[in-house]
Image (cartoon, rainbow, N blue to C red):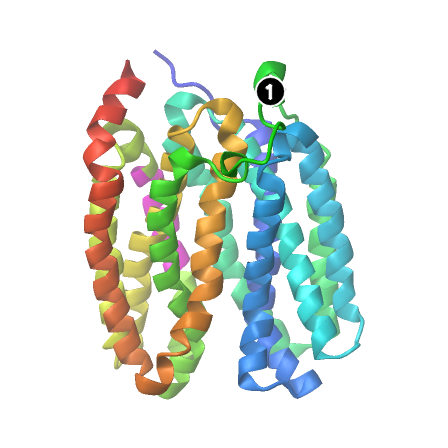
């Protein structure tokens, strides 16, 4: 029997839009804190807030749109998000102080939350059921590419050009994502299922209960990974490995790009446990190795292990969230997944910052490595022990 087609025009378009959106996010995240300090003389804590409040905004955007995406329409939601994304990107050119910059970052994050929830829902809808894990794995690679290319472009441009030029590029990329979205075709959702989504104000209409267990695991691993996103540059300065650190996310992304096609197919054929348990071990090993890094080679090896671990866990847990829910609630399932992921990534740096005065970055990474390892037991309790029954049900 032939496999259903995965690489359709619509799949490529939605993945491209997601790539452009997340490229802007990762491009700005590496330069916006320094910009706040240089332009507005912000303190270190304020600079951290300028960086992290974007992810908080993304979380708010997902909460805002998760319940309404199917009543508004998935494609219409995508266009609303993209138009607002372009408009809020233009606010970076307005200089009205640090408070206005914080508001801009928050609003920009909200629009990304709306648009990326729409792309994630649409792509889950158009991927064939039999290739869901593989398809979401490939789709997630669009974000993985942006984690490597975005920081590289941001750091390169910050050294060779002015910040307004960086903001101009971000605006162009936002407009390009809007133009690209015009060519996507989104299949309709049954009216009977859509009608049930818009009545009442129950919690189940803000989040998808069936996706919460695996989303909670995502929150924990996102919390641990947030330490890498937020503190890797400070840590590299501390251990005098700045040059090697500039390639950290590049090797991370290469590891994910090479492994994800295999892990996606493995999940579809054997089940999530065959991917998740090794990924927990690899992620934990990468964090512990990162905490003990004394050379550029060790630092980059840690990046590879973290890519093989967290990079594959991220797509695998998203696929689990979608598979656990009926098709007409894919929007809520996708939103729920990213709400928990964003909560871990967004609030993690702020919470971990309370421990840093009493601990070194090295110790922090090692401790978080053990947290990742222990969380594999929680995964078993919340999902892993049920996986075999789920696989049998889906096969039937």
Quarter of the image for residue 305 reads: bottom left
Vertical arrangement, residue 260 with respect to residue 147, above or below: above
Q: Nearer the viewer, residue 41 or 196?
A: 196
Q: How many marks?
A: 1
Quarter of the image for residue 307 reads: bottom left
> Residue 269, position in %: x, y?
26, 27
User: Could you tell me what secondary structure mostly forms the magenta stretch?
Assistant: helix
Q: Secondary structure at mark 1?
A: loop
Residue at 38% across / 14% down in the picture?
2
Q: Is residue 168 visible?
A: yes
Left or right: where does residue 133 sit relative to residue 43? left
Q: Is residue 297 visible?
A: no
Residue at 31% across / 60% down in the picture?
306
- Residue at the top extreme of this rendering: 1
Q: Nearer the viewer, residue 392 or 252?
A: 392
Q: Please report the bounds of the magenta region as a residue range.
A: 252-263
Q: Nearer the viewer, residue 390 or 194?
A: 194
Residue at 52% across / 41% down in the picture?
335
Residue at 39% across / 26% down in the picture?
131
Left or right: where does residue 375 sit relative to residue 130? left
Q: Nearer the viewer, residue 247 or 377?
A: 377
Mark 1: few/some/many CA within 10 Å (<14, 14-19, 20+): some
Q: Quadrant of the N terminus?
A: top left
- Residue 257 is inside the magenta segment: yes
Name the residue that disc number 1 marks.
189
Vertical arrangement, residue 125 with respect to residue 81, above or below: above
């Amino acid at each position: 029997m032939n496999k259903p087609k995965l690489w359709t025009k619509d799949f490529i378009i939605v993945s491209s839009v997601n790539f452009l959106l997340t490229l802007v996010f990762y491009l700005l995240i590496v330069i916006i804190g320094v910009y706040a300090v240089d332009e507005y003389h912000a303190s270190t804590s304020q600079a951290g807030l300028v960086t992290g409040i974007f992810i908080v905004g993304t979380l708010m955007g997902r909460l805002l749109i998760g319940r309404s995406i199917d009543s508004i329409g998935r494609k219409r939601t995508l266009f609303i998000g993209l138009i607002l994304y372009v408009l809020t990107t233009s606010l970076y050119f307005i200089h009205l102080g640090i408070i206005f910059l914080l508001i801009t970052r928050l609003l920009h994050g909200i629009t990304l939350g709306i648009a990326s929830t729409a792309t994630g829902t649409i792509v889950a809808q158009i991927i064939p059921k039999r290739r869901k894990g593989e398809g979401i794995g490939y789709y997630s690679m669009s974000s993985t590419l942006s984690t490597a290319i975005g920081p590289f472009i941001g750091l390169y441009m910050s050294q060779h050009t002015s910040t307004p030029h960086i903001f101009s590029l971000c605006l162009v990329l936002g407009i390009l994502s809007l133009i690209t979205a015009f060519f996507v075709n989104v299949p309709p959702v049954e009216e009977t299922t859509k009608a049930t989504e818009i009545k009442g104000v129950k919690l189940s209409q803000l989040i998808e209960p069936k996706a919460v267990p695996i989303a909670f695991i995502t929150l924990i691993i996102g919390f641990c990974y947030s330490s890498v996103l937020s503190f890797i540059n400070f840590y590299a300065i501390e251990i005098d490995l700045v040059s090697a650190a500039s390639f950290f996310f590049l090797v991370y992304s290469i590891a994910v790009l090479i492994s994800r096609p295999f892990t996606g197919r493995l999940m579809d054929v054997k089940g999530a446990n065959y991917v998740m348990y090794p990924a927990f071990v690899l992620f934990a090993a990468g964090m512990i190795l990162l905490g003990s890094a004394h050379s550029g080679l060790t630092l980059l090896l840690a990046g590879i292990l973290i890519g093989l671990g967290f990079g594959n866990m991220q797509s695998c847990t998203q696929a689990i969230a979608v598979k656990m829910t009926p098709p007409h609630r894919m929007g809520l399932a996708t939103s729920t997944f990213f709400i928990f992921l964003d909560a871990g990534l967004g609030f993690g740096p702020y919470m971990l910052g309370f421990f840093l005065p009493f601990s070194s970055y090295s110790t922090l990474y090692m401790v978080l490595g053990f947290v990742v390892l222990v969380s594999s037991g929680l995964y078993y309790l919340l999902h892993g022990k049920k996986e075999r029954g789920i696989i049998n049900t889906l096969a039937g």
